[in-house]
Amino acid sequence: MIISGPCGVESEKQVHEIAGELSKLNVHLLRGGIWKPRSRPDSFQGIGSEGLRWLKAAGIKNNLPVTVEVASPKHVEEALREKIDILWIGARTTVNPFLVQEIADALKGVNVPVMIKNPINPELELWIGAMERIDKAGIQHIAAIHRGFSTYEKTKYRNVPNWQIPIELKRRYPGLPLICDPSHICGTRELISSVSQTALDLNYDGLMIESHSNPDQALSDSQQQLTPSALKDLLANLVVRSAVIEDVIFRNLLEELREKIDSLDEDILNNISKRMEVAREIGKYKKENNITILQVQRWNEILRTRLQFGMDHELTREFILKMYELIHDESILQQTQMMNRKPVDIKQYTIDNEKHS
Ligand code: PEP
Ligand code: MN
């Protein structure tokens, strides 16, 4: 399912023009922000209520259902009055359970599909909580939109995808439709196609991509909106893969490869467990000799040599760093637990250990 349209509805002419162009593409739902949650008060705050009518009329004329963002009970009421087909809750609203509850209360007894964007911060429970509130209000059709997460770190994305969060959501709720919003993840046009492809490869159910007939003149998010013709090219180049494997030979090959992965994973966990065993042993000696757990020089040495080794073996720097930080944290935890054991436990530990080896 492809959702597209401008970040914000700006004028009657603009919304009719883009709707006309999108209706010629494979777009199923026309989006357009009416009330825009902007960081600064001097930027374009959205055209407001009158835009609802323009958007709906452009949708009817071009045979497209329409969707808008709602951030308050008043927005819900106005959007429903203008027969907006689908509502969505934005990232800045999902973070606030009070607001989500007010919206949920306004939706009681109403039959309208609602899409819920992830909260700005990478917190799966908050996202799920918002969907539960809307679900409890009796809304039958709910979808999740993944639009990336805010971070203070400098990255190539406007909002980092943190793919593991939507993947975990999908694992817990396999039936929940999951839509990716590459526009707000990327923040720039160049990255949109590769993020869209990743979403399809992860078996997402749809994409929400911002578009504008003249993106550079757009009153909000001008850097990330595509022209209809760029959107057309992007959609034509996406590869839709199947989640079910029909070819028997390929399925057998995949089975074999998965078995290899299973056995390698077992080796990894066995080795990590052995490594922790040694860490506890070291903890014991550090305690006996009364020295601190953290030895910065040693940690630097580990990082340096493992980075070199890993990168020589085609692993990325970021991956090795993250993995060693986790391993090191766990080693320190295990050593600390060992250090804080009473001497009698340590004696017992040594005996147990000797029994094992
Ligand atoms: C939008 O879709 O234009 C928008 C404001 O999105 P988000 O809530 O993801 O920031
Ligand atoms: Mn936007």
Image: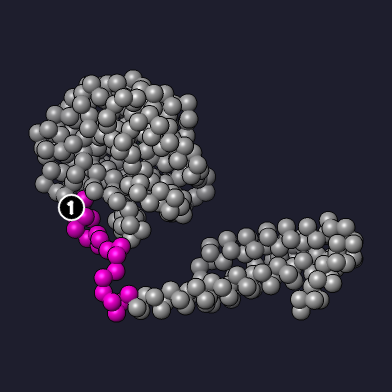
Can you see residue 68?
Answer: no
Residue 320 position, x and y percent, is 57, 66
Q: Residue furthest left?
A: 61
> Could you say whether the residue bearing mark 1 is in a helix, strand or loop?
helix
- Give the residues drawn in magenta, as a range: 229-251
> Is residue 15 something one can see in this rendering?
yes
Q: Is residue 240 magenta?
A: yes
Is 61 left or right of 189, judged from the image as shown?
left
Q: Nearer the viewer, residue 193 or 87?
A: 87
Q: Which residue is at 43% across, 36% downward?
A: 132
The image position of residue 58, as x and y in percent, is 14, 32
Residue beneath the point at 84% across and 72% down: 351
Q: Quadrant of residue 338?
A: bottom right
Instruction: Count how many numbered circles sit on residues in the image.
Output: 1
User: Eyeballing the image, is 243 above or below 351?
Assistant: above
Residue 6 percent across, percent down from the top left: 25, 38
Dot 1 crowding, Cα within 10 Å, few <14, some 14–19, many 20+: some
Q: Amino acid at mark 1?
A: Lys
Q: Is residue 354 left or right of residue 63?
A: right
Residue at 19%, 58% in the rendered image? 236
Seen from the viewer's position, the closer of residues 53 and 187 is 53
Measuring from the top left, give residue 184's x and y in whole percent: 36, 44
Q: Which residue is at the front of the view, 227 or 275?
A: 275
The residue that label 1 is drawn on is 232
* Residue 250 position (above or below residue 216): below
Q: In which quarter of the view is residue 139 placed?
A: top left
Specify whether tag 1 is near ligand 2 (CB below 8 Å).
no
From this view, report whether residue 71 is shown above or below residue 181: above
- At horizontal 27% and vertical 46% (from top left) the residue drawn is 209
Which one is in front, 16 or 330?
A: 330
